[in-house]
Amino acid sequence: MKVKKEDDELSVYEEGMFANIGEKIKGVAKFTTAVGSIIGIIVFIAMALIDDSMILAGLLVGVIVAIVSWVSSFTLYGFGVLISSTQNTERLTIELLKEMKNKE
């Protein structure tokens, strides 16, 4: 998000791949969680197919991989929320400044 001054007016604009970056970061966090969960399921199936005695171990490893993937996405998702909130605050602040300037 960039702040641009045109004719003594403030405006906010985003461009290119950085437009709406907070939502994109949250999307990446969701994607990595899904991929980690799928990998956990694949590990479980692979270990179960290798040997019947490894079903319990495969289940344990698969669940651990899925949980670690889910928990590790908290930080990335939280960062995306932080960016989105900051962009919204910046936009609202600029709108408030415009309104205050118009009342003068």
Image: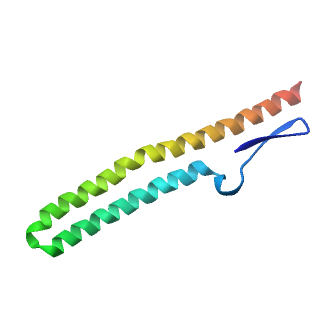
What residue is rendered at 18% in x and 69% in y? Answer: 47
What residue is rendered at 86% in x and 37% in y? Answer: 9
Quick check: 78 left or right of 103? left
What residue is rendered at 13% in x and 62% in y? Answer: 56
Residue 94: quadrant of the picture: top right
Residue farthest toward the top in the current orientation of the protein = 104
Residue farthest toward the bottom in the current orientation of the protein = 49
In this rendering, the answer to whether 91 lies above or below 104 is: below
Residue 29, how many percent across, how many down?
A: 46, 53
Residue farthest toward the right in the current orientation of the protein = 7
Residue 82, how many percent across, how many down?
A: 54, 40
Quick check: 64 left or right of 21? left
**Quadrant (top left, top right, bottom left, bottom right) of the N terminus:** top right
**Quadrant (top left, top right, bottom left, bottom right) of the C terminus:** top right
Number of on-image labels = 0
Residue 2, how many percent across, how many down?
A: 73, 43
Quick check: 94 left or right of 55? right
In this rendering, the answer to whether 49 lies above or below 57 is: below
Residue 16: quadrant of the picture: bottom right
What residue is rendered at 42% in x and 58% in y? Answer: 32
Residue 39: quadrant of the picture: bottom left
Residue 71, how many percent across, how many down?
A: 35, 47
Quick check: 57 left or right of 104? left
Scheme of image coloration: rainbow
